[in-house]
Image: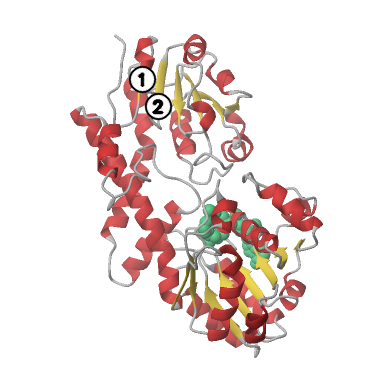
Amino acid sequence: MTASERHAKGSRMRIAMIGTGYVGLVTGTCLAEVGNDVVCVDVDPERIATLRGSKVPFFEPRLEGMVTRNVAGGRLSFSEELGPAVRASEVIFLAVGTPSGPTGEADISQVLAAGLQVAEAADGPKVLATKSTVPVGTGDRLDELVRGATSERIDVVSNPEFLKEGNAVEDFMKPDRVVIGTDSTEARELMSDLYAPFMRTSDRAMFMDRRSAELVKYAANGLLATKISFMNEVANICEAVGADVAKVREAVGADPRIGSKFLFPGPGFGGSCFPKDVAAMAHTAREVGEPFRILEAVGEVNRAQKLRIVAKIVRRFGEDLSDHHFAVWGLAFKPGTDDVREAPALTIIQGLLDRGASVSAHDPEAMRTAAAVLGAGVHMAPTAYDACQGADALIVVTEWNQYRTPDLERIKGLLRTPVVFDGRNLYRPGRLAALGMEHYPVGRPSTKLE
Ligand code: NAD
């Protein structure tokens, strides 16, 4: 069936997803959920074996049930073999990693290698859509690469992904926008059909040239990261002048041109996207001779912000922390995920360990992933309260719901000294002081008991 015939019929598609991480698995499963036939491919045999048992190798709300349902329905399968998956599919997505290189550039070697494998396996016309976040011009490089490897027609399309870990299924099923970069009419029709079931209330597909589509993703993440770093610096000024960032945030966010979202100060942003995408866009900008001074600063501000809580702890307890023990609540880079990539908690814990302290940590989902990075030197506590036992202070790093209204009196009883470093402003100033506890929030007045 040609793309135009399919367009007229609007029938299901056969899809291969190359890379079955957060993005690939969510995308593949959601595409199967609306009736398509999807095979998810990964080079990691352990991952494929786990998925074949209908187990999701990471925590993402709603995903496991959806995987189970679609596997049972015969629409979703998993494979280590790329060739057969490509030959059986009309659309092949690349959802492999694009980690940071040594000078902040995005390392696109996995994308190019997978793209080449797809071209070598192709036995007919295909659409090759890049979901991975890649620098401008990667689509052109892929295009050249596949043309050199096959005489089959392969339309290389940019289709960046905007899902948020912790809400990924919802984000994919109800996207704010779907960005599609291509100048091929057939590829445009096919991608438009593919996404139609996700946009029944209104069409949010945005078509553009490939280079613009590639840039959208970096510009969006760059702007979001800028908002966070901006408010973190406002919070730091609030601390210096005795203002309250919570009040400032509310009033600033009331302006609809600014908006109230993403204005919460904290211990800096982490995750697999913002830090690397900010660095990659700044790198691209330097390369093309248009230095992105704001983004360079955003990265720098964020690195400093992650260490700020450690500096406060040192001011309170001294540089040598070898006789000290701390409780850390929250290891994931944000609530709703077990992802600890670039998580502020890791930097903070390392800062404490470097000064000789010992640490007990708790997280509802991320203790396994964090332990894999931190090693056995950090005690993972079975409950949040267990982590506080005998600690000199509690440090709250990730704003999981269960940390919002804890039994503060119980915490006071468990701690050796009643001190809370509140990295997410979860507790009202005055509330802890009333209980005889010291409180160090972000950008709000601290209460130190003398
Ligand atoms: P990930 O590291 O979780 O998953 C990538 C997967 O690709 C791994 O399982 C790896 O084994 C597999 N892989 C690598 N080479 C392969 C090959 N040749 N064939 C088959 N599988 C291969 O990565 P992720 O978090 O899903 O991110 C993927 C891309 O999407 C990145 O470019 C990222 O920047 C972007 N992105 C991520 C998010 C997010 O929230 N995680 C959101 C939007 C965009």
Q: Mark 1 points at which residue?
A: 439
Q: Mark 2 points at which residue?
A: 422
User: Residue 78 location in percent, x, y?
Assistant: 76, 61
Q: Are marks 1 and 2 in contact (CB under 8 Å)?
A: yes
Q: Which secondary structure lies at badge 1? A: strand
Question: Is 17 placed above or below 165 here?
Answer: below
Quadrant, the N terminus: bottom right
Residue sticking out furthest to the front: 201
Of labels 1 and 2, earlier in sequence is 2
Ligand 1 lies in quarter: bottom right
Q: Which mark is residue 368?
A: none
Residue 2 location, x and y as percent? 67, 87
Q: Is residue 395 above or below residue 223?
A: above
Camera sees residue 271: yes
Residue at the spot 68% in from the left edge and 78% down from the top edge: 90
Instruction: Tell which of 193 and 21 is nearer to you.
Output: 193
Badge 2: how crowded within 10 Å, few (<14), some, or many (20+)?
A: many
In this orientation, which residue lies closer to the viewer: 313 or 397?
A: 397
